[in-house]
Image (cartoon, rainbow, N blue to C red):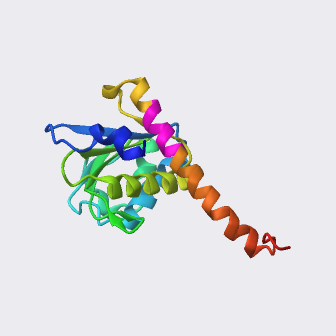
Amino acid sequence: MDAWEQLRWLFDTDDGGLYDIRLAGLDESGVVAAFEFIRARSAVTPDARFWHTGLERDELVADYPDAARLVVRGVAEAFHVLAPGLAFAGVTLPDLGVFVWPDEVTLDYRMGPEWGPPELTALFEFLRQLVAVAGGRVELGSGVGATVSQQFAGELKAYSARCAAEAEPSAAADRGLGSDS
């Protein structure tokens, strides 16, 4: 059974809720790298704000290239932005929300008909690249339970392994280690 058949119930029917995908276990550099990765690939909400504790006022995320670092260092409170237009594997993902916390980045999404097999593949590619850049581990939010989170992580791991296996023959050929050598 393919990943979509295993996980479709997490995506295909809009029940009005928002669901979380967590990139957890990050250090400062991981949180910063994750947010920079997302910010470089999406026009994040231009009017998103955070509370700057040092200045004691709301500030625009867009005015701070290091907004995620400020959160990790306790100079700013956690914030949320919308990241529309993220595209991976040739597919544009449905809009994702992005929460930046001191030790993780949490993505939120709305279930619905805009999700299908191509979007799940694009989500897996996005997460694979995000983990490669930032480190950490992918988990689903606590509302779905450990078993479902492990199933999602297992499907992501299988996708990542397939990507690595597909990349290996071309990497070997680049090094002159083709099968006829």
User: Which residue is outermost to the right?
Assistant: 181
**Residue 93, visible in the rendered structure:** yes
Q: State the quadrant of the C terminus.
A: bottom right
Q: Residue at position x 49%, y 54% from top?
A: 130
Question: Is residue 36 toward the left or the right of residue 173 in the image?
Answer: left
Q: Residue at x 24, y 60 (%)?
A: 45
Q: What predominant SS class does the magenta segment belong to? A: helix
Name the spot of residue 108 as percent of width and height, x first: 29, 44
Q: Is residue 70 above or below residue 103?
A: below
Image location (x, y in percent) of residue 120: 36, 52
Observer-nearest of 60 and 176: 176
Tell me: 103 left or right of 176: left
Give me the residue at 23% from left, 55% from top. Answer: 48
Magenta residues span: 150-157
Residue 87 shown in magenta: no
Can residue 76 be seen? no
Rendering quarter of residue 84: bottom left
The number of numbered discs placed on residues in the rendered structure image is 0
Quarter holding the N terminus is top left
Kindly identify the residue that appears in the image at 15 percent across and 37 percent down: 15
Residue 60, x across and y down, in percent: 26, 58
Of residues 6 and 136, which is closer to you in this image? 6
In the image as oriented, which residue stretches furthest toward the left? 16
Left/right of residue 81 with respect to residue 24 in the rendered view: left
Q: Is residue 51 left or right of residue 6?
A: left
